[in-house]
Image (cartoon, rainbow, N blue to C red):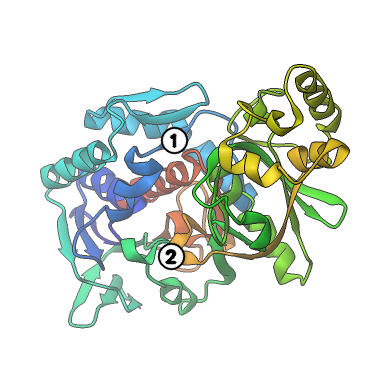
Amino acid sequence: MKNKSILILGGGASGLAAAVQAGQMGARVTILERSDRVGKKLLATGNGRCNLANMDEPCYFGDTDFARRVLQSMPVADVLGFFDSLGLPTREDASGRVYPACNQAAAVLDVLRLHLERVHARVITGAQAQAILPEKDGYCVRTADAAYHADCVLVCCGGLAAPKLGAVNAYGLLTALGCKLAAPAPALAPIETEKAPLRGLSGLRLPATLTLCDGDQPIARTQGEVLFADYGVSGVCAMQLARDAQRLLSARRQPMLYLDFSPTMGIGAYRMARLEPGRPDDNLPAVRAFLKRRAQILPNDALLLGALPRLLRERMAAYRGEELARMLCAYPLRVTGVRGYDQAQVTQGGIDPADFDPATMACKKHPGLYACGEILNVDGDCGGYNLQFAFATGLLAARDAAK
């Protein structure tokens, strides 16, 4: 039997992993990449460190059952085993996040590109797929100036987030073949809020607990480092609330974001994580006690000296007593929006995975057609979950397509 010919649309995380895996199995692989080079977004992940997996409990949204079944078929240990076989050392930090041991995203791209060369994969840049046409013995993929034929096609085009890094709207490639689409929207994006409470705080970065509420109802809570901007708040802990904030805004609700500065003042436990929702002011007794102790040793005009950064101390100077305690543990910000795809890390929504087999990523309607990674209606929290899903789906698809 002749070796399978495989076209991979997109040279991102899932596409590169799939190309290497399929090539190692003897397939003849061609990557069509819209940008001038592959792996642009991969280099930017994890602030240039490439958080490629997470050993903790999976945290996914969209079609969560599909994500769970994918990771049953391709566990994180198998993904890391794939990279180990390529010669990439990795390490796990205290939170379960896995990085290349050298802390450089370029190392991940380097080993993938080396093995692309070793399996003689063909990489064509500046080539954006415009249509996938089923043929008698495979598929034809048309670009603006060429047509490519193959036994199998893997759609690894990603979502709409980070257009400067090559994101493109490729959903039409699959909806034209009968696949359904869940409306896409930015996820893991900064949150816009009313501006008056932010005045004087732009540029400040500090640990905090953030609680998103719909009226009096707590919806979601995170803890980590928050970054103040003139438009609202950013940082991982804020961006992980963007999905729920967008949902409430789309339903014409008026979500509120409450910031608890207890971690900055050394009150209670602190870790960068998603937490169970609770009342925004549930740390109020501890903050009251904190202020009472400090009032015994410091004058009122220096009550927060050494406990808060100068910019935040100046913002809190107008408050006294019970009002100060409440502002320190439940600083209110009315949410007005979510930043767009240009500042989002991933896309929520996408192609409905119901048309695909989570054990192989094969399309149930069109044999030889596969979809991988962010183009599907699965997205995860920060911490390596999105890359882990991308790599897992790419490997599953390649193994099935190349066999």
Residue at (40%, 41%) from the top-left corner? 46
Q: Can I make out residue 211 in this image?
A: yes
Q: Nearer the viewer, residue 395 or 46?
A: 46
Foreground: disc 1 or disc 2: 2
Q: Is residue 316 left or right of residue 394?
A: right
The image shows residue 306 at horizontal and vertical percentages of 60, 26
Q: Callout 1, which amino acid? A: Ala
Q: Secondary structure at mark 2?
A: helix
The image shows residue 280 at horizontal and vertical percentages of 80, 42
Q: What residue occupies the far bottom of the structure in this picture? A: 144
Q: Can I make out residue 362 in this image?
A: no
Q: Nearer the viewer, residue 286 or 235?
A: 286
Figure quadrant of residue 51: top left
Q: Determine whether label 1 and label 2 are within 8 Å by CB.
A: no
Mark 2 surroundings: few (<14), some (14-19) or many (≥20) residues within 10 A: some
Q: Is residue 14 left or right of residue 348?
A: left
Check the image and report above or below for 2 versus 36: above
Mark 1 surroundings: few (<14), some (14-19) or many (≥20) residues within 10 A: many
Task: Say whether disc 1 or disc 2 marks the residue closer to the N-terminus.
Answer: 1
Residue 53 is marked as 1
Q: Callout 2, which amino acid? A: Asp
Residue topped by disc 2: 342
Residue at (75%, 37%) from the top-left corner? 276
The image shows residue 233 at horizontal and vertical percentages of 58, 53
Q: How many marks?
A: 2
The image shows residue 357 at horizontal and vertical percentages of 52, 54
